[in-house]
Amino acid sequence: MARKSPIWPYLSLARTRWQGWRRTHLVWAVRYDGQFAGQLSVFHITWGANRSAQVGYWIDEQLAGRGITPTALAMAVDHCFLVMGMHRLVAGIRPENAASRRVVEKLGFRDEGVRVREVHIDGAWRDHICYAITAEEVPGGMLERWRDRGHASAQG
């Protein structure tokens, strides 16, 4: 299996770069106070009539609760809607992941219900709650709205 091979990290990086070039996948490093703090991805980007994608993110556990993840997600949403011209973003989150659910709820993503046994994780099919937002729901941009609420950190 390629993932057990010593060349896996290089293959993965090459694939990610190719997907970025094709505009089907974006990956950002999240920095806080000058240091690497986590990652945010926009993936399964589809164009044409859909102009949609899925989002995923993680943050160093020691930095959680500081508004870093919602700020990074708001920036990514603005890039996708205002720069790339996308229309809809979706976050699939496991029901027990309360912290991740709070991130999208703070930003105004809509709960669209449970997708039963959607993703195979740790040897079993796991449910995910589907949260979504469209460009019409944040016409002036999400980061500005997040900052207006006094949440966005000036550090980065």
Image (spheres, rainbow, N blue to C red):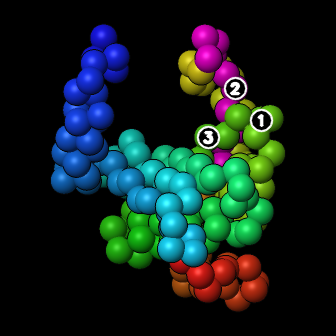
* Image quarter of the N terminus: top left
Q: Which residue is mark 1?
A: 95
Q: Which residue is mark 2?
A: 127
Determine whether, in the image, residue 54 is placed left or right of residue 74. Answer: left
Disc marking residue 128: none
Q: In terms of image quadrants, where is residue 18? A: top left
Residue 126: in magenta span = yes
Please say if 104 is above or below 153.
above
The answer to whether the residue labelled 1 contacts the one labelled 2, judged by CB atoms less than 8 Å apart, is: yes
Determine whether, in the image, residue 88 is placed left or right of residue 123. Answer: left
Disc marking residue 92: 3
- Dominant SS of magenta comes to strand
- Tag 1 secondary structure: loop
Q: Residue at x 41, y 76 (%)?
A: 82
Please say if 145 is above or below 111.
below
- Tag 3 secondary structure: strand
- Check disc 2 and give the amino acid type: Asp
Q: Residue at x 56, y 59 (%)?
A: 37
- Check disc 1 and give the amino acid type: Pro
Q: Which residues are magenta?
A: 122-131
